Image (tube, grey):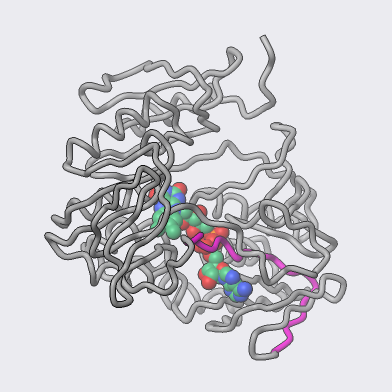
Amino acid sequence: MDVLIVGASAAGLSTAEALRRLGHDGRLTLLDAEPHLPYDRPPLSKQVLAGAWEPERARLRGQAQLDALEAEFVRGERAVSLDVAGRAVTTASGRVLRADAVVLATGLTPCRLPGQGGLAGVHVLRGLDHALTLRAHLTAGTRLVVVGEGVLGGEIAATARGLGLEVTLAGLGPAVLGDQLGPFVSGLLTRTHAGRGVRLRLGVAVEGLEGEGGRVTGVRLATGETLPADVVVVAVGSRPATGWLDGSGLALGDGVECDSRCRAAEGVYAVGDVASFHHEELGRRLRLENRTNATEQAQTVAANVLGADRPYTPIPYFWTDQYDVKIQAHGLPSPAAEVTVTEGDPEQHRFAALYREGGQVTAVLGWNMPKQARLLRQQVLVQPLTTA
Ligand SMILES: Cc1cc2nc3c(=O)[nH]c(=O)nc-3n(C[C@H](O)[C@H](O)[C@H](O)COP(=O)(O)OP(=O)(O)OC[C@H]3O[C@@H](n4cnc5c(N)ncnc54)[C@H](O)[C@@H]3O)c2cc1C
């Protein structure tokens, strides 16, 4: 059997490794639009952006480990279409790659603001080249505006403050990570940013960018205020990289729609950030944008490609590092949940908390308390909420 994996990053590479581990000895091809050897993305907004790590340190595997896979890596070639019935992928250069099974692992594309493309000094952060370009512009004293109060916006603001920039964080939500972690934890995180000297303009829409001579000079808010900026990072979310699959006949909603086996069609699977799968225990569709999911889902996808019939039913997990705060969340925290601190003390910047909805523990969160959060994870139920 020949397997073709489109996207050779965290999820695609883990799928290839799992296939070999499970005994797949047929042809294995990994296609990626990136020219670089596979690298990890979490350090891009942290150690790489801070300049603490050389880019090579973010590599997912060394050359020897990649060689041991006995796979063909096709790098720097973009997939432009998929023939589902024939399991054939055409690349931008016109090359056609055929296989018995195709795994889609193309991740996300960052969203941009209208007019962003025409202005110098405006950045997004998804890939290594983005991180290195942005890094070159982050010098002490520079005025940086980060648009987007989500996890990426928070991390970039924290890293930039560490480098001595003047940082303003602007976003529609009332608090950093408020959409994901709810008022209690996001309130603490927002106060942490303020305490570190980040100017906050939250709960207000960004109307547009202002520029002069082709270079950004500011970010205009719906209130009429303009935030002066030498550099702007737009971190307003990402969408699944499925544009190349338009017309393939696959169901593309919020990502590549799969069944509980991560199968999008006969012989076609999706894995990682791009995959919207049916979580059997939750009874609904889920798409996870986190690093742990990329590796975990790959194990299930590889097994199913090789003939297993395994549902994917993870307890989601993500972490974020901002300043000296490490937040880890197991389960599905929601702003609607009731949050109870069970260990430690938020005032001391170390605590673990349970998220409850309808009397059910839906998530556990650790704030500089990784071990306690891991232990409490056993209480998390990922299943439909019971109505009390
Ligand atoms: C800056 C940053 C920081 C992060 N920090 C954290 C964190 O702290 N904690 C956490 O849990 N998660 C974090 N994440 C999320 C985590 O990195 C992702 O969940 C993970 O990378 C998903 O892996 P993936 O392989 O599904 O997608 P990706 O890593 O996005 O890989 C997709 C690959 O597909 C390729 N591709 C796309 N389209 C095509 C095409 N048409 N043809 C060929 N190739 C294509 C791309 O070049 C890319 O290499 C972070 C992400 C970013 C960007």
Picture coordinates of residue 248, whole percent (x, y) = 80, 69
From this view, report whether residue 161 is shown above or below residue 380. Answer: below
User: Do we see residue 13 in this rendering?
Assistant: no
- The residue that appears at 25% across and 32% down in the rendered structure is 191
Q: Is residue 202 left or right of residue 250?
A: left
Q: Residue at x 25, y 49 (%)?
A: 168
| Identity of the residue drawn at 60% across and 80% down | 78
- View extreme (front): residue: 224
* Highlighted magenta segment, given as a residue range: 95-112
Assign the C terminus to one quadrant of the image: top right
Between 179 and 250, the one lying in front of the other is 179
Is 112 situated above or below 193? below
Residue 295: image location, x then y, percent: 55, 54
Residue at 27% x, 22% y: name it: 346
204 part of magenta stretch: no
Residue 135: quadrant of the picture: bottom left
Find out whether residue 110 is within the magenta segment. yes
Q: Establish if 155 lies above or below 339.
A: below
